[in-house]
Image (tube, rainbow, N blue to C red):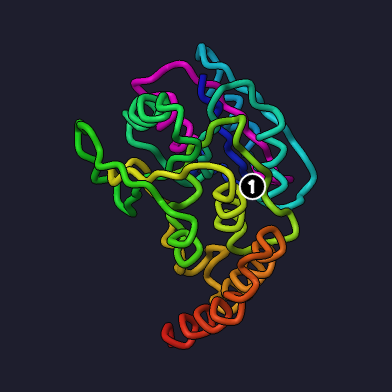
Amino acid sequence: MISVVIPCYNSESTIEMTLDSVANQTYKDFEIILVDDGSFDNTKQRIEAFFKNKNIAYKYIYQTNRGVSAARNRGIREVRGEYIAFLDSDDMWHPQKLEIVSNILKDASIDILGHAHTFKSNFSNHYGLCVLKKVSFFKLLLKNFATTPSVVIKKKSCGYFDEKMRYTEDHELWLRMALENQLYFCDLPLSVIGREPLSEGGLSADRWAMRKGELQMYKNIVRYKKSLLPLYPFLVIFSLLKHVRKF
């Protein structure tokens, strides 16, 4: 079974679209864990109305507002499936997403799978086999390999997001897991991201805050892997140069 973890906050305008994309999956052995991070709109009512008269396993959890990482971590603690798939409350999946990734993850050597995404609902009607590539730790160190709604992880390999981080917390978690697990990337765009990463309104809209998050990520990973310490100054320079280039 695949456990789908969806954090939500004031998501009344998008949550039904997101849930529809899960309900319409060709692969049906899933559960949905919704963690409401302190919404004060009609998110809960929209969720309850969506599941009424539907034979779908789901769990709704409400918590006071603690941030998306805390919401995802709460969802991770509640899952019952062999795999964990992340989805945000304003994003969607291709109908074959869970079918395709479940087939790939049957390979015992693959612990974490990311795939491509798109910003438009222009999915192909049917996807065949994807081109699968192994992602090395050092390649991941320089570039995040997949957005959070495009990542599926074997439960036994899944860590927790750093709740003190508001930016690049996903990249930081993938790096920690990559120290002991095999990461692979599938080239099929199986997710529609509702907002481009640097668009107005997203967490990553604040470019400098995002860069500081990346610097914190490098500091964290050097703490976990001491042999990377000589690389740390170069990683800092690399991050700052990316920031300057944006302007």
Residue 61 lies left or right of residue 191; in this view the side is right
Question: Disc 1 residue type?
Answer: Tyr
Q: Residue at x 52, y 44 (%)?
A: 88
Whether residue 175 is situated above or below residue 233 in the rendered picture: above
Q: Position of residue 19 (x, y in %)?
A: 48, 32
**Residue at the farthest right position:** 64
Q: Is residue 121 magenta?
A: no
Q: Position of residue 14 (x, y in %)?
A: 49, 43
Q: Residue at x 55, y 57 (%)?
A: 171
Whether residue 109 is situated above or below residue 51 in the rendered picture: below
SS under mark 1: loop
Residue 110 image-quadrant placement: top left
**Residue at the farthest front position:** 227
Residue 188 lies left or right of residue 87; in this view the side is left
User: Looking at the image, how many numbered discs can be counted on the residues?
Assistant: 1
Whether residue 170 is situated above or below residue 159 in the rendered picture: below
Residue under numbered circle 1 = 9
Q: Position of residue 138 (x, y in %)?
A: 47, 62
Whether residue 82 is situated above or below residue 131 in the rendered picture: above
Q: Residue at x 33, y 43 (%)?
A: 186
Residue 73 image-quadrant placement: top right
Q: Is residue 33 magenta?
A: yes
Q: Residues within 10 Å of mark 1 (few under 14, many from 20)?
A: many
In depth, the one of 147 and 102 nearer the eye is 102
Q: Quadrant of the C terminus?
A: bottom left
Q: Which residues are magenta?
A: 16-41
In depth, the one of 229 and 104 nearer the eye is 229
Q: Residue at x 53, y 39 (%)?
A: 86
Q: Position of residue 58 (x, y in %)?
A: 60, 21
In depth, the one of 237 and 231 nearer the eye is 231
